[in-house]
Structure formats: C-alpha cells, structure tokens
Image (tube, rainbow, N blue to C red):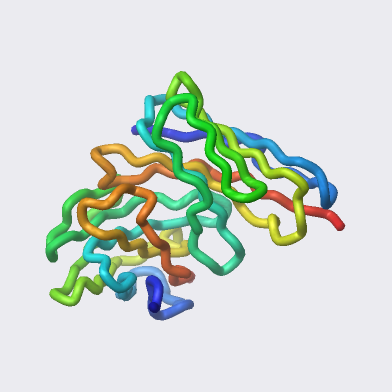
Amino acid sequence: DAGVTQSPTHLIKTRGQQVTLRCSPKSGHDTVSWYQQALGQGPQFIFQYYEEEERQRGNFPDRFSGHQFPNYSSELNVNALLLGDSALYLCASAGAGKGPETQYFGPGTRLLVL
Amino acid sequence: GQQLNQSPQSMFIQEGEDVSMNCTSSSIFNTWLWYKQDPGEGPVLLIALYKAGELTSNGRLTAQFGITRKDSFLNISASIPSDVGIYFCAGPYNYGQNFVFGPGTRLSVLP
C-alpha cells in the first residue's frame, strides 16, 4: 500500500515564475492538505481540499491556489514566485470524518526560488 | 492566530540518556499530537493525546496532555542514535480541518 506520494522531489525556479506541485493521497484517503515548511521551522497550513473543493485556508496569499481531482489527487500552484517561497512543501492526506491522528504526510517537494 | 512554542529548541545528549521536551500554547487544545521528522521526510505521528491529564506511551516514548490543556510533554527514555531528528508538537483546531505546528525541538544523540 503506497503512502502519500509527491512530485517532483526537488525543483528550482526563478522569481516571478509559476510552479505546480503534485500529490497522490494514501489509498482510501479523500482529504488532502498542503503545508509549507520553511527551513528550521514547523509546517504551516496552506489549505485543505475535500470533494474537489477548498474546505479551509491558512494565512497564505491568493498566489497560492490548489485543485483536487476526482481521484482525490491534488495540485498546489504558486504564481509570481518570491524568494521567500523557497521551502519544503508537504502534502498530507486523511480519511473523511477521521480524527487528526489519521493524517499521513508525504516526503515533500523542496522548492528553491532564485 | 494560535501559536505553539517548544522547548528546548535543540538538545545534544549522550546515547542512553533520557530526554524531556515540552510544548505550550496560547490557546486550549482538545487534541495534542507529537510528530518526528527525519531529514528529507515528512513528519511521522508518534503519539496522539485526547484528554487533559492523559499519559500515553509508545515504546520508549511517553507523552502527557497537560491539565490546563495548554501544554504537552514528550519524554524519550534510553535514547538511541535513531532518535535523532526534529520533534514537533501539533494541534488541530477548527474541528480538525486545520493544524498548527510548533517550531520543533532538534535532537542530536552522541554515541
């Protein structure tokens, strides 16, 4: 049983560019959350998707957007990249209606913005 | 917004020693979670706590839900080299749809 998978593993972009990160949830999970983890800090919640809709959003600008597909996989899009967007982007999946302890994290995509 | 603080920020211990770390919040939590993150990996859940005063163990790890519901503690007994990593506390709010993480405690175990 594959866990949460993310692609790509690493990415280098320049300021002003756009990036798309991808996540496949753990089998049987239908809720996907995205987190940004800056170096030396804890993960920060970006948003959560369920039934192809954004259910909740953290304190991130509109440059951060997402999508969830009918197969529950998800994309995170970031427009007009800034140097400060350099971070590890984590995807986590959970089953609907399950407790918070059921959330599984993927290995992350490390984004470097130059 | 809600913030979590963890102490210590980092610690260096000898293999075999016991470790204690804690997490405090400015708000009340109904659930506390402790995660460990290894380099290049996502956080992995170690222990989940659901009731004030609850004490839960997972092997050599023991965590407690503070009675004020604004803090939690994690202890590791007889540390081994694979305990190296970053330990995060986290709590859900808004009915579990959102998580807030602490800044982490970085543990180094010296042989």
Instruction: Residue A7 in the image: state x and y as whole percent.
Output: 39, 79
Q: Name the quarter where the N terminus of chain B is drawn.
A: top left
Identify which residue, A110 or B100, lies in the foreground. B100
From what the image shows, is residue B69 above or below residue A41?
above
The residue that appears at 46% across and 56% down in the rendered structure is: A37
On the rendered structure, is A70 left or right of B111? left
Task: Tell me if residue B75 can be seen.
Answer: yes
From what the image shows, is residue B88 above or below residue A19?
above
Task: Pick out the residue farthest to the top.
Answer: B68
The residue that appears at 43% across and 25% down in the rendered structure is: B69
On the rendered structure, is B37 left or right of B10? left
Q: Name the quarter where the C terminus of chain B is drawn.
A: bottom right
Instruction: Residue A113 in the image: state x and y as whole percent.
Output: 45, 69
Identify which residue, B87 or B103, lies in the foreground. B87
The residue that appears at 25% across and 38% down in the rendered structure is: B94
Please identify the quarter of the rendering in which residue A6 is found.
bottom left
Instruction: Residue A80 in the image: state x and y as whole percent.
Output: 30, 66
On the rendered structure, is B26 left or right of B62? left
Please identify the quarter of the rendering in which residue B7 is found.
top right
Instruction: Residue B68 in the image: state x and y as whole percent.
Output: 45, 19
Please identify the quarter of the rendering in which residue A52 is found.
bottom left
Identify which residue, B3 or B96, lies in the foreground. B96
